[in-house]
Amino acid sequence: MKRYCLTLLVAIVTLATNAQQWEIDFSDHEFANAVGHGVLATDGSVIAVGYIGSDNTPFNPMLLRVYPNGSYKEHDCYDIPSFNLVSPLKLNNGNYMALGATLKYDGHDYYGYELGAIVFNDSLEIVSTRTYDTDSLVAKLINAKAIVDTDGTVVVCGEYEPGSTHARPFFYRLNEDGDILDCLFEEPSNGHWTFNCYQILKDPRSDGYIVIGTNHDGQCAMAFYDRQFAKKGSVLPSHNGYMALYTEFNSEKWLSQDNMLTFGFAIDGRGHGWDLLLADINLDGTVNRYVNALNTPDTSYNIAGGRCMAVVNDTTMYGLFYLYPAFKGFGINPGVCLFNKNMEILGVHRFLDAKYNDVAPGSVIATPDGGCVLLCYKTPQYMDTDSFIIKMSREDFNPIPCSISEVPKEQLRATAYPNPTRGELNIDISNLSQNTENRVSITDMQGITRMSRIIQGSGNLLTIDVTVLETGVYFYSVYNREKEIIKEKFIKN
């Protein structure tokens, strides 16, 4: 399919909700579409990429600039190769590059993926396009990620399937026009080392790279390569109690030269399903600390995903995740959480409206105002794939202002007070262990978490400021990693 699309400047689509600043809904687009990747431009807009297509034609690229006010411009894409665009990044010369993947066709059937790239300028005009010949390889190229190296070249990492063996990494080094400077497809080894790639990072200790992914058992792994893509080693971060401490994870925040803040999900070895985790992981594989980010006794949701993380600063970091609402019996919904470098969850938002059923979170882009832009789309198995671009502010996440203090025992009460309350809610936490990690959350009558935070500090009285909540009935819960300790109802006047 080759399609001529006029360049459009589309008006803002605003939802009547306090949880979002604006939303762009592409369900009325001429063709099915999926926009799942983006990068922040210099002017604060978001460059978003994906693909468009229909039920009986190959897909074509989709290239957008989304402005801070919610309007957007869609580039005419009739003359671009039929790529699904992913992993856009800003080059040192001011242009942008996005990787492309397209199904290869032998005249009868589609097989495998062919890799390519497009380069475009700040006006979204195409500067160059490249397609990389992989016909000599029995390969399936997927999950391509890219970074700009210190010398301005682009390093691409992804995975391919050489014949019937498990996935292996591949690497490209490209110049700013997309020309290949170096290429390596890692050969299978006798040691059954296989690798699925989720992210590539510059190694802060050397002139090399760190590739984050999973091995053949689904365990998280970090592999280390030098500048020539020679493998220098690998580690499998793990922790007692978890079968695989991160079956999928990524990092965009270094805590020091040797350890990173990671965000992802794990399979709980205790048989409790999937857990969304934050962890401080050393590059030698040591897990210094981890937090079950959305540990809750509410079994209405299974949580997974978590490859997407965006950083504004130490106190504003966002992570996307998948929700599997058990009460719906099928499908997924997107969710996003706000946290800081101390691994405190400052806020959570779940998208549970019917229109978000079967919608996958693609990526999250942190914005200069401290908020974020979410790129989501219908899951690929549905032919009526549509995209959603959602802008949220930091204030939308309602982090709990709270403190812990010590008061005389005779002044403590068994339940929260005052109840009803207009402002502060005091909770007796004298029975909580100070040596375990505890969390407080507030949910509304629909079971949606309105506030959530790790309890830090010492004392026996927890004070929460609930001023931002609307008038109504809520539940507060205090729990540790294993179980719920306290759950009571309160009224906000």
Image (tube, rainbow, N blue to C red):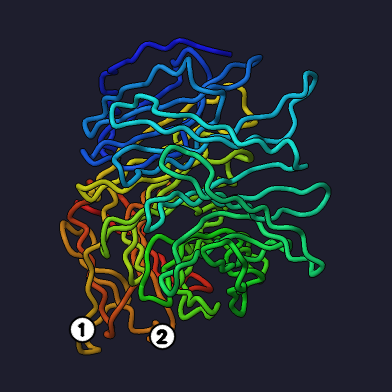
Residue 433 visible in rendering = yes
Image: 257 above or below 442: below
Q: Nearer the viewer, mark 2 or mark 1?
A: 2
Residue 358 appears in view? no
How far is disc 2 from disc 1 in space, using C-alphas? 20 Å
Q: Horizontal and vertical percent for residue 321? A: 48, 50
Check disc 2: other Cα within 10 Å, few if <14, some if 14-19, many if 20+: few
Q: Nearer the viewer, residue 82 or 59?
A: 82
Q: Is residue 44 left or right of residue 259?
A: left
Q: Position of residue 191 (x, y in %)?
A: 79, 70
**Which residue is under mark 2?**
433
* Residue 102 in which image quadrant: top right
Dot 2 falls on a residue whose secondary structure is: loop
Q: Quadrant of residue 17?
A: top left
Q: Residue drawn 67% across and 59% down? A: 195
At 57% across and 65% down in the image, what residue appears? 246
Q: Nearer the viewer, residue 280 or 452?
A: 280
Residue 348 x/y as whole percent: 37, 53
Q: Is the residue marked by circle 1 packed among few (<14), some (14-19), or many (20+) residues within 10 Å?
A: few
Indicate whether 155 appears above or below 126. Answer: below
Disc number at residue 131?
A: none
Foreground residue, 112 or 245? Answer: 112
The first of marks 2 and 1 along the sequence is 1
On the rendered structure, is 344 left or right of 177? left
Quadrant of residue 316 within the rendered picture: bottom left
The spot of residue 302 in percent (x, y) is 57, 53
Secondary structure state at the residue bearing disc 1: helix
Three-letter code, disc 2: Ser
Residue type at mark 1: give it: Gln
348 shown above or below 25? below
In the rendering, which numbered label is found on residue 411?
1
